[in-house]
Amino acid sequence: MTRTALRRTLAVAAAASLALSLAACAPSTTPAGDAASGYVTDGKLTIGTGEPAYYPWVIDDKPESGEGFEAAIAYAVAEELGFSKDDVVWVRTTFDEAIAPGAKSFDFNLQQFSITDERKQNVDFSSPYYETTQVVITTESSKAAGAKSIADLKGLLIGAQTGTTSFDAVEQIIKPTAGAQVFNTNDDAKLALESGTVDAIVVDLPTAFYLTGVELTGGLIIGQLPLSDGKSGDEFGLVLPKDSPLTAKVTAAVDALRANGTLADIAAQWLADAADAPVLK
């Protein structure tokens, strides 16, 4: 090798070494500490909810306002975790996306997700922040208006949102002869009830009070469905990615809010009383 060729070789090697050194020192495109902290974005708390998010869970589909039961719960959890309101970021997902396996766009999500063993195979849950029951509602003009028992409902068309505990309750408790009528959202189910496509629908208790009192003309609550597993109610939990490093922290935050009375205070502010919803037999 000539001296000129040797100098060229050494220059190329030096340049390559310098490039590698600079690359090693360059900042990562992923915010530092994200992987270790478990948060989607370092320094922010990313919370997921539905699109749209309904009353009484979120008021006017604006979770950032903190108004509505779940919006208020979200900000209470955020504060317990050490985040200010300005550090909360909201994202929207469908119900099914949130509980499907795989990576998530949120740190936790709340859309009245009932805690079930089946869902725990795909995602983590916090401890429960609310306990409710499933309720059958109808309208004054429906064939279901005079129903007084589960037996009275079996021959009718009963629907619910797919993928929910409400839908499971139709299939497992009412067991209508025509099968459970499937809807993508509670809004679709409500429209079907209004049009007479179905005779009744099943929703959670707070939604039942809202739909029958505000949304439906002549709305009626037939009654609450008993639970076949011996529980006193259906438990809602915050959904986190499977094996999230935040699950223990978020659960501790929810437990603290339960212990200091915050969960009860928020429920009293935003959710209706159950006195007018008898349990069906």
Image (cartoon, rainbow, N blue to C red):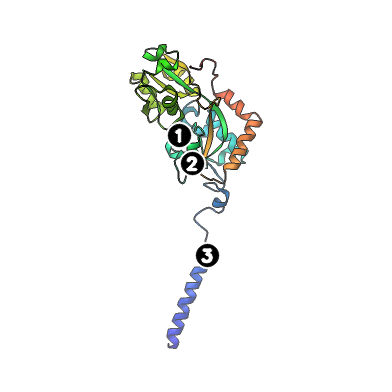
Is 202 drawn above or below residue 73 in the view shown?
above
Residue wearing tag 1:
50
* Label annotation for residue 121: 2
Q: Disc 2 residue type?
A: Gln
Relative to 217, 83 lies left or right: right
Q: Label 2's element?
A: loop
**CA distance separating discs 1 and 3:** 41 Å
Q: Label 1's element?
A: loop
Q: Disc 3 residue type?
A: Ala
Front-most of residues 32 and 227: 227
From the image, state whether disc 1 or disc 3 is nearer to you: 1
Residue wearing tag 3:
24
Whether residues under marks 1 and 3 lie with C-beta atoms below 8 angstroms apart, the answer is no
Residue 281, how many percent across, how many down? Answer: 48, 16
Front-most of residues 13 and 256: 256
**CA distance separating discs 3 and 2:** 39 Å
